[in-house]
Image (cartoon, coloured by chain):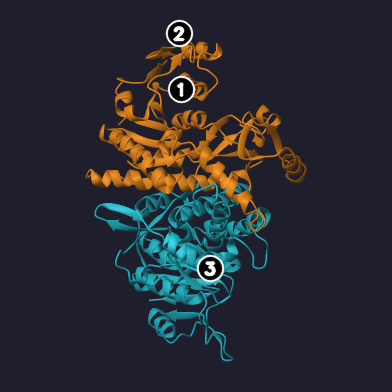
Chain colours: A cyan, B orange
Amino acid sequence: MDRVVVALGGNALLRQGQEDTFENVYASSRLAAERVVGLAEAGWEIVVTHGNGPQVGRILLQQEAASGWVHPMPLDVCGAQSQGQIGYLLQATIGDVFFERGMERPVVTILTLTRVRADDPAFGDPTKPVGPFYEEGEAAKLVSERGWAMKPDPHGGFRRVVPSPAPYSIVEAPVIRQLVADGVIVIASGGGGVPVIEDGPRLVGVEGVVDKDLAAAILARDVEASVLLVLTDVARVQRGFGTDDAEELERLTVAEARELLEAGEFGAGSMGPKVRAASDFVGGGGSRAVIADLDAAVAALAGEAGTTIVP
Amino acid sequence: MDRVVVALGGNALLRQGQEDTFENVYASSRLAAERVVGLAEAGWEIVVTHGNGPQVGRILLQQEAASGWVHPMPLDVCGAQSQGQIGYLLQATIGDVFFERGMERPVVTILTLTRVRADDPAFGDPTKPVGPFYEEGEAAKLVSERGWAMKPDPHGGFRRVVPSPAPYSIVEAPVIRQLVADGVIVIASGGGGVPVIEDGPRLVGVEGVVDKDLAAAILARDVEASVLLVLTDVARVQRGFGTDDAEELERLTVAEARELLEAGEFGAGSMGPKVRAASDFVGGGGSRAVIADLDAAVAALAGEAGTTIVP
């Protein structure tokens, strides 16, 4: 049976412009669940992964609001919390859709740690903003009290920035691979997984954010998936993004994808990391990667939608 | 190989009287991890379960402190978050101790849902206090705005109370059983698991708290463990608890344990549910259950410490 790692974008957990109420999050998760079950019906073994940016942001905001009474936890612990939160919603809704369609498939969430290198240059240059916005005075105080790195935000104010190191292996991959081979739908590596470095024989959690799409590529390699499916809210990758000559791409080789990446053809948004993840996976031995709209998931795997990247 | 479900008490995550800083929680978790690895060295297949009361309490407090900016999530979602948080700390520290002792064993955390009955009488009589303390006026407001049940607390003020329904099966048990049979150390059913009821074919999360020891007994049955080990901070169960005639018990049959339970010999604290969980497990076909001090875990399983309950 063919195996796919499905990377869900932010729209899988909250449709754009919606308020982050439980009802809205649940409804979005339910729509994503229908796509995932559609893939299972089409015969795929499935590992689901997802982002956690907005969820961790909310947890950090909640922590700071209560910091007079409850000690805030480090970012790695918050990331693990968000994996529990999001995994629960996805697992519950995926399970529901299976039941409703008369299928029985176990669905489990595996808390995931992602190995990063202690000497990753990202640790010397934190760039990823997380958590609340602060005034300059508060920001300076947090720098001295907690040792945070803070940067001015383009939207005004200051935000904490953390490193975004490159993932190189998924700690739980052997277990995930075995489960998915046994027919279990596995939700894993949420938010890119909690980053850990090796300190002698120990794995030590670090405060950073692993790009979820790059982690999905590593996960797909480590669980021996044949396809990486990156779901987002656009139909196809565009070259010349944001220009008058923008052009939708149906099919790219890894070499072509990397050339366009280098030329900055995908704009400054989140499409770059998605194309890079797809190229990493296919360049590292995967059969193909597809970047497509969430609602076109089944068609995309059948080669009828999205942008396909091949060796 | 013999299989044990180890239920960690609150002291496994924070020693009594300590502040709930990350450093303290990590250090406590590390001590618990050493006990768990000790059991693995003694040849046991292991599923670890744990409470989440203080952690969910802190998450609820954080949610309320930020409720002006972030929509609070229902209790079932908070429970899932706490499973991620605690599972991460236990998994990381257990993994560390294995590595340090030159052993390699995969350790994974499985997000767990626990089935409860929709007609459980507990839903008509919520008794379990959760979250922050409120003044009477605020309490009345929350009753009308959110439909919460609130009760005066013996420590003063009012608290939300939720139902504590009886668990009857663990949704992820088949997967957990397979993993533990493959040599994986599994952390599961944290905080008793997220309670779910069956609504036709669907599983619907409910706002309630499943007693973690009763859930541990169900988990132990469902993963076909031979022993349930309930770890706490006292050496042995006492009959006549709190009286001048208090007497430590080394060994009890299920029938004896149930008789003492009914007579209220274990006091009003948390020992009652532990003895009931032990009796449920052994009465339902388990070989034995042991209630012991965390630090005596290995001796307890060897029959040299704690209170053993036999058929």
Q: Nearer the viewer, mark 1 or mark 3?
A: 3
Tell me the residue that label 3 is attached to.
Answer: A137
Which label number is shown at residue B278? Answer: 1
Q: Residues within 10 Å of mark 3 (few under 14, many from 20)?
A: few
For the residue carrying disc 1, how many other residues have a C-alpha within 10 Å: few (<14), some (14-19), or many (20+)? many
B244 w.r.t. B294: above or below: above
User: Is residue B260 depicted above or below A104 in this figure?
Assistant: above
Out of A288 and B3, give the one closest to the viewer: B3
Residue corresponding to mark 2? B245
Q: Residue B188 appears at what percent x and percent y? A: 45, 40
Give, as a three-letter code, the residue at label 1.
Ala
A56 left or right of B307 in image: right
Toward the viewer: A137 or A53? A137
Q: In percent of the image, x 53 and y 57: which residue is there?
A: A60
Who is closer to the viewer here, A169 or A42?
A169
The quarter in which the C terminus of chain A is drawn is: bottom left
Q: Amino acid at mark 2?
A: Asp
Residue at coordinates 52% horizontally, 79% vertically from top-left? A237
In percent of width and height, residue B96 lies at: 30, 47
Near mark 2 (Cα within 10 A), the count class, few <14, some 14-19 or many ≥20, is few
- The picture places residue B8, in percent across and down from the top left corner, at 42, 33
Gap in angstroms between the C-alphas marked 2 and 3: 62 Å
Q: Which label was assigned to residue B144?
A: none
Compared with A294, B35 (above or below) is above
| Quadrant (top left, top right, bottom left, bottom right) of the N terminus of chain A | bottom left
Tell which of A18 and B153 is nearer to you: B153
